[in-house]
């Protein structure tokens, strides 16, 4: 599984490599600049011929140093190159300074200013199909909001009032924007924009078409607003070893969820070998969500799946199901009775359950110590007493809140994410999910395009439904119920809570991608066979 790095981890890997004598900082910077140039030419082969124009904006640190390498290498390829520097050349760090000097032998460096005479400005003649603007202002060293952005934002977004009339009418092409390591202004650890509080009214941010990062993706490329600022993300290898020790302990690492293993069924196995999932339904007129979850549990391979419903809802359910089974569970006591059957290996409570029923049924469900998914109403029901819920949870539980449900159980953590990100590293969805899991004493899966999964021991993973795995069709009613069913079905089959949450989240996104536009929640379980077949299950 690929690791997603923080800025500190990237620095630690780089330092370990340099200290061991394996490579110098200058060599890494050269490889970084070369990697950006290669990625640009690979992304846009049309720039390979002719004499395109590069406008390179360099910042005061090593990100700026990469910019000077890019400028030199493009100049050597015959590009017309214009270089701007935000900061004082005398204060550049040593490697960046060396590359600044090397560039100075080839061309001028203009002081980058945001306002006033001589401020950064793209000439109308720069708005050509073959103009590329390189943002090498700030990378992983960004610690505070960037003040000097208006000019870049306006230039790259063809803003209304600084451009000639004909451009405003779209007569000119937009320049292509390449972010070096990260779009400047984005926090590498959280994917949030660092902004002063209150945010400045009219600052435009850099939105890249292509982001070229080094060695491995950073969390900020995947989390929160990151994907909408990065465009296509390419990782340029710069010859660094993985150096797992530099990454720190399990509570510091985040792996990206990849295709799960272990979904196949042994030829000789009996249905009970694949577990029996119990999905608890709400009352009459509210059974759809549980039926969705149950069907997902069955499709993901649980050997048997039973719906437990109050008497008044049984007719409604019976008319809608075939392979699923149905039992009555009017009350907590009746559910406890059903759970005396040791063959029931996993439970799912929450979708469409109703708050009152949730308060009655969640305690006996947790008492049974099975793999248990709690979602929706099973979480909201404890809004006023989260500690009461946490006291009952155990290690085989998975909570699957969306942001709203998360805020009900962990209001202070949700508040941390709401606070303006005024300095880096800013609080991230990974930080708060980890803390939530520790507090709850079980696995927490915080839903979203950037779904974060954390266990109480600090282990965490991120399932990215962004970039090339974007699955915007998942934003449809009932998609979350299906996810709950998937995780439950996987636990019924014997997956641990953490592995089931990771695999469920991965399959959920893949099923949505397999179906594509027009997806509704019912389609997700039906798209699973195709996904499972591709996995060789
Ligand atoms: N690690 C690696 O393996 C490799 C790293 N490489 C490259 O190095 C980059 C990291 O370099 P970096 O650490 O020098 O940080 P960088 O992003 O250039 O910014 C720091 C400078 O900005 C300043 N500054 C910060 N915020 C500011 C603000 N809001 N407004 C104004 N100034 C602000 C800050 O000033 P200070 O906070 O010290 O006052 C400092 O001067 C990385 O992203 C990658 O591109 C590759 O070359 C090869 C391999
Ligand atoms: N834009 C999106 N990209 C990827 N996944 C998404 C997106 N929007 C929603 N999802 C996923 O869809 C599911 C929605 O769940 P939830 O909010 O509980 O909806 P519901 O209660 O209607 O089922 C979550 O798993 C979430 O991660
Ligand atoms: K940058």
Image: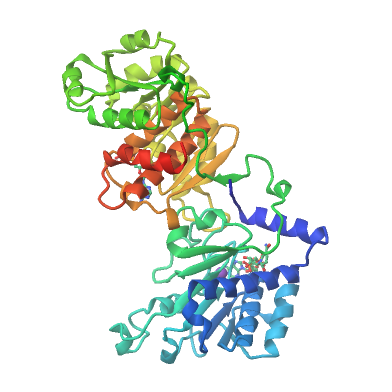
Q: Is residue 245 left or right of residue 401?
A: right
- The residue that appears at 70% across and 75% down in the rendered structure is 96
Q: Is residue 253 left or right of residue 12?
A: left
**Residue 461 or 161: which is nearer the viewer?**
461
Vertical placement of 531 versus 211: above or below?
A: above
Quadrant of the image occupied by residue 123: bottom left
- The residue that appears at 34% across and 89% down in the rendered structure is 164
In the rendered image, which quarter contains the N terminus?
Answer: top right
**Residue 340 or 208: which is nearer the viewer?**
340
Quadrant of the image occupied by residue 83: bottom right
- The residue that appears at 37% across and 20% down in the rendered structure is 362
Scheme by which the image is coloured:
rainbow
x then y, percent, for residue 461: 54, 42
**In the image as oriented, which residue stretches furthest toward the front?**
267
x then y, percent, for residue 250: 64, 39
x then y, percent, for residue 24: 78, 67
Q: Is residue 415 left or right of residue 83?
A: left
Quadrant of the image occupied by residue 302: top left
Vertical placement of 431 versus 219: above or below?
A: above
Q: Is residue 310 visible in the rendered structure shown here?
A: yes
* Ligand 2 location (quadrant): top left
Q: Is residue 411 visible in the rendered structure shown here?
A: no
């Amino acid at each position: 599984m690929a690791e997603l790095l923080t800025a500190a981890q990237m620095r630690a890997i780089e330092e370990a490599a340099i200290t061991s004598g394996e490579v110098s900082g200058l060599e890494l910077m050269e490889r970084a600049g070369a990697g950006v140039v290669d990625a640009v030419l690979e992304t846009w082969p049309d720039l390979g011929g002719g004499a395109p124009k590069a406008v390179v904006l360099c910042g005061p640190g090593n990100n700026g140093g990469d910019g000077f390498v890019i400028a030199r290498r493009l100049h050597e390829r015959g590009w017309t190159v214009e270089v701007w520097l935000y900061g004082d050349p005398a204060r550049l760090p040593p490697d960046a300074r060396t590359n600044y000097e090397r560039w100075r032998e080839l061309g001028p460096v203009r002081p980058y200013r945001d306002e006033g005479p001589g401020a950064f400005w793209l000439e109308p003649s720069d708005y050509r199909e073959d103009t590329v603007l390189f943002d090498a202002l700030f990378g992983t060293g960004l610690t505070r909001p960037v003040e000097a952005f208006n000019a870049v934002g306006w230039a790259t977004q063809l803003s209304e009032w600084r451009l000639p009339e004909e451009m405003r009418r779209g007569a000119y092409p937009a320049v292509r924007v390449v972010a070096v390591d990260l779009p400047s202004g984005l926090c590498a650890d959280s994917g949030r924009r660092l902004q002063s509080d209150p945010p400045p009214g009219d600052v435009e941010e850099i939105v890249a078409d292509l982001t070229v990062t080094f060695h491995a993706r950073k969390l900020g490329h995947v989390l929160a607003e990151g994907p909408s600022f990065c465009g296509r993300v390419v990782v340029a290898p710069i010859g660094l070893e993985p150096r797992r020790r530099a990454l720190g302990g399990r509570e510091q690492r985040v792996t990206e969820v990849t295709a799960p293993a272990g979904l196949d069924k042994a030829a000789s196995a009996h249905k009970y070998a694949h577990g029996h999932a119990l999905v608890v339904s709400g009352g009459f007129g509210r059974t759809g969500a549980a039926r969705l979850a149950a069907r997902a549990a069955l499709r993901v391979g649980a050997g048997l799946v039973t719906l437990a419903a109050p008497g008044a809802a049984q007719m409604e359910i019976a008319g809608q199901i075939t392979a699923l089974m149905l039992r009555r569970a009017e009350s907590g006591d009746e559910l406890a009775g059903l759970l005396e059957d040791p063959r029931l290996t996993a439970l799912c409570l929450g979708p469409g359950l109703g708050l009152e029923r949730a308060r009655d049924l969640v305690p006996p469900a947790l008492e049974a110590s099975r793999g248990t998914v709690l979602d929706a109403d099973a979480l909201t029901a404890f809004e006023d007493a989260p500690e009461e819920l946490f006291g009952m949870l155990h290690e085989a539980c998975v909570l699957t809140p969306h942001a709203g449900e998360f805020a009900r159980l962990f209001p202070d953590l949700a508040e941390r994410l709401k606070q303006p990100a005024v300095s880096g590293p800013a609080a991230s969805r990974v930080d708060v999910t980890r803390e939530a899991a520790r507090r709850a004493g079980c696995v927490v899966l915080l839903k979203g395009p950037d779904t974060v999964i954390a266990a109480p021991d600090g282990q965490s993973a991120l399932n990215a439904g962004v970039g090339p795995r974007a699955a915007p069709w998942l934003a449809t009613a009932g998609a979350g119920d299906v996810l709950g069913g998937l995780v439950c079905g996987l636990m019924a089959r014997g997956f641990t809570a953490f592995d089931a949450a990771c695999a469920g989240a991965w399959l959920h996104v893949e099923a949505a991608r397999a179906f594509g536009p027009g997806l509704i929640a019912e389609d997700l379980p039906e798209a699973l066979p195709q996904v499972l077949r591709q996995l060789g299950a």
